[in-house]
Amino acid sequence: MVVDDQVMVRAGLAAIVGSQPDLEVVGEAGDGAAAVELAGTLRPDVILMDIRMPGVDGLTATARLTSGPNPPRVLVLTTFHHDAYVFQALRAGASGFLLKDSEPAELVAAVRTVAAGDAMLSPAVTRSLIDAFASGAVSAAPETDPRIDALTPRERDVLIAIARGLSNAEIGAQLGITTGTVKVHVNALLGKIGVRDRVQATIVAYDTGLVSPGPRHPGGAAGV
C-alpha cells in the first residue's frame, strides 16, 4: 500500500512497485488516518509511508499500524534525512527508511527486503543513525532493563555486535561460532526483547545502555 499526500508521488511509487511481477499495489491513501483505516481492510504486507502529511502524519500512523496484531511492515519514504525523523520512525516501529531520491531499483529492493522480514535503511540513513549515537547526539540510558536481563550472555554478545553494525558472518567470526548459530541467537534475542528486526534491536541496545556510543564499525552501513 502506498501512502503519500501528493497524488503524483503516489502514482509514481505505485507504478514502480506494480511493474514488478512479484509485487502488487493493493491500495493508496493520502494521509495517515486513511492509511490506518484502509490497512485494516486490505491487510497489506508492506506499506510505503510518507512522513509529512496533513492531519495524521506518517510517524503517528506508523505507530498505530505497528501496535496491533500481525502488523504490516512499514517502509518510510521521505525527502528528509534528519536524525530526528530517523529515530522517531524507527521507534514508531518502521522496518525501513528510504529517501525519495533513491533509484527505483533501490525502492523495489527495499520493499522486497522488508516484506521478507528484514530491516532496510539506505546507507546514508544508516550512517546517520550510528554516527548520531557515536557522537552522543542521541543519549543512551545506562539503566538495567528487563528485556536485556532476559538474554543469555551469548545473546547479549550477539546483540552488542548487531548494534555495532556487524553482519551475521562477522559476528560468527568474532565470537567463534557458525553463521547458522548466529542466526539462532538473533531470532531468539529478537523475540526476548520484543522487536521484529535488527534495526529495532539496535535501538534497544543503545536505549538501554547495553552499548555505549563509540566509533562505528567500518562495515556498519551494511551490517545493520
Image (tube, helix red, strand yellow):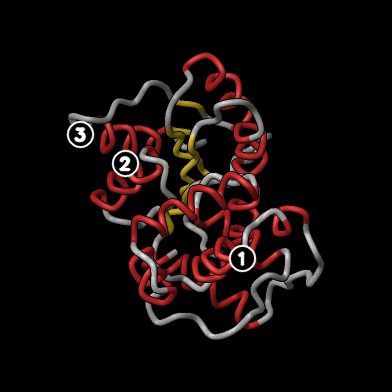
**Is 169 left or right of 41, judged from the image as shown?**
left
> How packed is label 2: few (under 14 Cα within 10 Å), some, or many (20 or more)?
some
- Tell me, yes or no, if residue 78 can be seen here: no
Residue 176, percent across and down?
39, 73
Direction bottom: furthest residue: 215
Q: Amino acid at mark 1?
A: Pro
Q: Disc 2 to disc 1, how far (Cα)?
A: 33 Å
The spot of residue 2 in percent (x, y) is: 43, 32
Residue 193's spot in the image, x, y percent?
A: 65, 50
**Would you call the spot at circle 3 few (<14 residues within 10 Å), some (14-19), or many (20 or more)?**
few
Q: Which mark is residue 153?
A: 1
Q: Marks 3/2: CA distance? A: 11 Å
Disc on the earlier residue, 2 or 1? 2
Residue 16 % position (x, y): 26, 38
| Mark 3 residue element | loop
Q: Is residue 75 above or below residue 180?
A: above
Q: Which residue is mark 3?
A: 20
Q: Depth-wise, is mark 3 or mark 1 nearer the camera?
A: 1
Give the label on residue 112, or none.
2
